[in-house]
Amino acid sequence: MERIIVDNAGKKFKIGFIKSQSALARLVSLLSGREPKKIIWALKDVSLKINPQEVVGIIGENGSGKSTLLRCISKIYKTDAGKIKTNGKIISLIGLDIGMQHRLTMKDNIYLCCSLFGLSRQEIKQKFDSVIKFSELQQFVNTKLYQFSEGMKQRLAFSIAVHCEPEILLLDEVFEVGDEKFKEKSANKIKELVKKGVSVILVSHNLSIIEKHCDRAILLAKGSIKKEGKTKEVLRAYENK
Amino acid sequence: MGKLKNFWQLSLALAKTQFKLRNEGSYLGILWYLLNPLLMFILLLFIFSSSLGSAVPNYPLYLLLGVVMFNFFQQITSFSIRTMDENRLIVKSINFSRESLVASNVLRTLFAHLFEIVLFFIIALFFGVSLKGIIFYIPILLLFSIFIYGASLILSSLYVYFIDIENIWLFFSRLLFFATPIFYSVSSGKLFILNLFNPVYYFITIARELIIYNRLPEFWLIFGSLIYSLAFFVVGSSMFSKMKDKFAELI
């Protein structure tokens, strides 16, 4: 049974734009604080299927709809067309914003983020040591996050995400974080999860990461799938466009 | 049942976070929670005890209970109104129960409210008032919290679509403070009729009757508080659930 089925999915947004208006219309806009808006389709007729134990890479230029697709899959956004069906617990790491609070300690943040990912207090207690050990930040358990480097925060976020029992893991520019040793460790962790049946979607501008870890890839452009298939072929199509 | 447990645990975790964040680095910490209602109480007592409050038995306690209960209502609604916007990063990154953000505001304010009730208790002892009725504050507070939760769901969801609601609410809640018999008493006339449509009036009156005057409130007051709690909870929950799909893209 597929983990993710995306069937002709579409997502539209209203965005502000500069419109040539009369002086009166501009005055009305200024006073009311309302700007002219138009509709754009950030995703258009996107269809894909992802199976258990599959690692799929999504590439494309900025604004091509990669993060929007991840948000639609994780049901953060509701699609305006088509259907998305998922089977399994989704853990999304979209731009490291997993609710971490910089004025709180690492311990508090682990409890908060794991709660947001649906773990009970008992489950968090059981996994707490493992999260810390994996992130290799044992000596900073009671340190507030604003004193962490970006790399340390990334390691913590990644460690939390992989310990929250995902069945579908969505990673947006959050893979191969930290130093070389940690990069290898996180890659091995992903392989371990995939062996257990987890499906992973990697979104990255770093094509070597996609090439190294993905079974297949999808190229998005202007909200539509331009190419889908073996990673090397899709990467070639992206580089030659 | 499992979903409800998860919702409760997440709301509690968020409430703890907000509570810690608010007190982080503060020297007076939790005392700030008491300072606002306490100052308001002292000020109103000083101004009205010999005029509007002269005919009200146990006026200091009557006033303090009104002030702390209204403060509880005002704090939760004002925290909740911007809660989606303030938590936009997680709302845009993780699919979790959005309602728990509003519930967490109720829980953290509830915790702070307990200190206000302790203050009320101490002042009641000082005035030699029997506090046998204080036990009834638990069900009253529960119903009051359900009503406020419902009202906060309505406000927080409206804010995402209609940002002006914050200023409207600021004005309206100030108006409500003066319209509700907090520092004066009302038992007839236009203002009394107007207060029949004011849910806060029911909860404050019931609490005063039971706790300060050790009297059973009239049935219509109890019935009204139940109806308002239920109505706001149902309307708030259904409105929020219909509007929440667009939160992540509008904030």
Image (tube, rainbow, N blue to C red):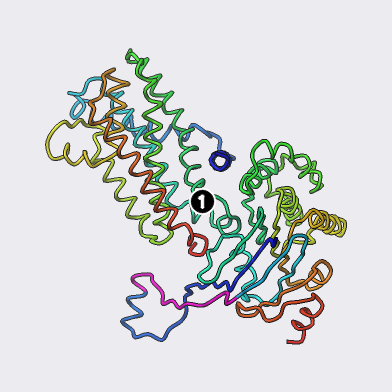
Give left or right: position of B216 versus A125: left
Q: Which residues are magenta?
A: A30-45
Task: Please tell me whether residue A40 belongs to the stretch shown in magenta.
Answer: yes
| Residue in the image at 71% along x and 80% along y | A227
Instruction: Report if residue B21 is visible in the image.
Output: no
| Res B217 → quadrant | top left
| Residue at image location 46% in from the left, 37% down from the top | B109
Of B241 and A5, which appears nearest the observer?
A: A5
Is residue B136 depicted above or below A141 in this figure?
A: above
| Rendered position, B217 above or below B225 | above
The quarter of the picture where the N terminus of chain B appears is top right
Element under disc 1: loop
Q: Quick check: A71 above or below A47?
A: above
Q: Which residue corresponds to the image point at 66% horizontal and 53% vertical from the top-left?
A: A89
**Above or below for B54 versus B76:** above
What subunit carries mark 1?
B
Q: Amino acid at mark 1?
A: Arg
Residue B91 can be seen, yes or no:
yes
**Relative depth, front residue between A91 and B186:** A91
| Residue drawn at point x = 21 percent, y = 39 percent | B195
Q: Which residue is mark 1?
A: B98
Measured as percent of width and height from the top left, residue B27 is found at 56, 35
How far across and how far down the image is residue A26, in percent? 36, 80
Residue A67 on the magenta span: no
